[in-house]
Image (cartoon, helix red, strand yellow):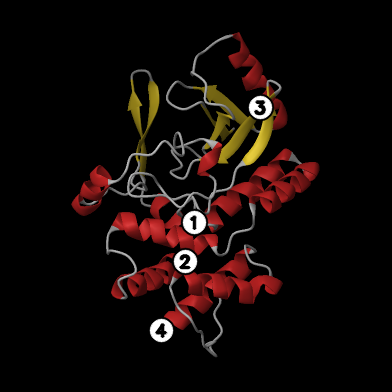
Amino acid sequence: MVYEAIKKLVCYGLETGLVEPEDRIYTVNQILDVLKLDEYEEPEEEFSGVNLEETLGELLDYACGQGIIEDSIVYRDLFDTRLMNCLMPRPSQVIKKFWEEYKTSPEAATAYYYKLSQDSDYIRRYRIVKDMKWVTSTEYGDLDITVNLSKPEKDPKAIAAAKLAKQSGYPKCLLCRENEGYAGRTNHPARNNHRIIPITVNDSAWGFQYSPYVYYNEHCIVFNGQHTPMKIEKNTFVKLFDFVKLFPHYFLAPTRIFPSWAAPF
């Protein structure tokens, strides 16, 4: 059964374009290593239209049954992100593809990147659809209300483990560049399957990424390449205009909670 799940995951990678046909065997072997398997027998059955949530669930159940991980939402999320990284292109490949698409149009570039962020399970489609959204009328106009259910609650065992975990200053925060490819731990989310697009804003290095929790449609985040105090100043507006010049189909808003967030018009 585990061999079938492995083949289905690889087929998913081939169908979505995460995996090139020439990388199929390599991808299988990477998955075997994560699952601590030394051998593999290719199932004869062919798979198409693979359900990612179900396939990852099968592999996670196997890992729990073999004692590779604890059966907890935190450990399962850490582990399935490692599995998805076996399908992922290198950051340099993503960056190269993004700017190739940008030559066609900024919309083509962000469409590629957003699809990648979903196909890679960095944005978990099957959780996002559970979010509650509705519009209610108020004396000030219609108000959009959302209840985000895509960020899972930690169970008591994981909370206790996080308290005992060694405190680390790496990555320095949840948004900095050092998160790209980071395996995560009980007190920091896994980002193995995370890829960042470097951009230049106000003549300095910044990063462009999507939020894994999609608080808004195509909710993305723009962050400074350096850890600096967040403040609203004259240069803030230079940064805002630099970004919308790059991506005129998006709007950008500064915030003191995150460096800044953006979404399409």
Q: Position of residue 10 (x, y in %)?
A: 56, 72
Q: Position of residue 183 (x, y in %)?
A: 46, 52
- Say which amino acid is labelled 4: Met
Q: Which label's residue is closer to the chain start, 3 or 4?
A: 4
Q: Which label's residue is closer to the chain start, 4 or 1?
A: 4
Q: Element at badge 3?
A: helix
The C terminus: image quadrant? top right
Residue, x 46% and y 42% (percent of image)?
214
Question: Would you name the residue on which mark 4 appears?
Answer: 1
Q: Which label's residue is closer to the chain start, 3 or 1?
A: 1
Residue, x 49% and y 41% (percent of image)?
211
Q: Is residue 93 visible?
A: yes
Query: Can you tell which quarter of the image residue 78 is in?
Result: bottom left
Question: Would you name the residue on which mark 3 appears?
Answer: 243
Question: Would you name the residue on which mark 1 appears?
Answer: 121
- Say which amino acid is labelled 3: Phe
**Which one is closest to the eye, mark 3 or mark 4?**
4
Q: Element at badge 1?
A: loop
Question: Would you name the residue on which mark 2 appears?
Answer: 52
Q: Is residue 3 above or below residue 18?
A: below
Marks 3/4: CA–CA distance: 48 Å
Q: Which label's residue is closer to the chain start, 2 or 3?
A: 2
Marks 4/2: CA–CA distance: 16 Å
Q: Which label's residue is closer to the chain start, 4 or 2?
A: 4
Residue, x 46% and y 55% (percent of image)?
125
- Say which amino acid is labelled 1: Asp
Q: Is residue 11 visible?
A: no
**In the foreground, 147 or 18:** 18
